Image (spheres, rainbow, N blue to C red):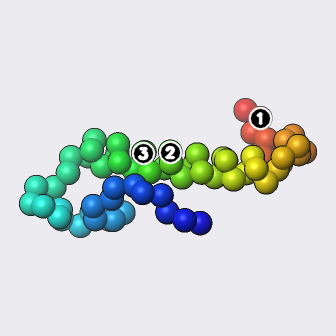
Amino acid sequence: MSEESVPQQGGAGGAGGASGQPKGLLQQMEELMAALNADLSALDADLQSTSGTRRGAGGAEDGG
């Protein structure tokens, strides 16, 4: 897995703050969601290219 060019400043922890003032919770959530979305998009593309025609072969079906 290769990491995409996501502008991360510190890491996943955020112990303090790189440039003085700590980020707000909303800012952290936005960044985490953006990173998660990018990872899920890459995973989805990888799965689609791998599965090909085997789309509904009986795998991760979530029936509410």
The answer to whether one can see residue 9 in this image is: yes
- Residue at 35% from the left image edge and 48% from the top image edge: 31
Task: Please give left or right for residue 5 compared with residue 25 in the image.
Answer: right
Rendered image: mark on residue 34: 3
Q: Where is the C terminus found, in terms of image quarters?
A: top right
- Residue at 17% from the left image edge and 64% from the top image edge: 18
Instruction: List the residue tagged with mark 2.
Output: 37
Q: Disc 1 marks which amino acid?
A: Gly
- Foreground pick, 9 / 57: 9
Label 3 – label 1 distance at C-alpha: 27 Å
Give percent across and percent down for residue 3: 49, 63
User: Is disc 3 placed on a helix, strand or loop?
Assistant: helix
- Residue at 88% from the left image edge and 43% from the top image edge: 53
Q: Disc 3 marks which amino acid?
A: Ala
Closer to us: mark 2 or mark 1? Answer: 2
Instruction: List the residue tagged with mark 1.
Output: 63
Q: Disc 2 marks which amino acid?
A: Asn
Give percent across and percent down for residue 2: 55, 65
Query: Which of marks 1 and 3 precedes in the sequence?
Result: 3
Q: Where is the N terminus found, in terms of image quarters?
A: bottom right
Contact (CB < 8 A) between labels 3 and 2? yes
* In the image, residue 63 above or below residue 47: above
Give percent across and percent down for residue 61: 79, 41
- Foreground pick, 51 / 13: 51
- Foreground pick, 7 / 10: 7
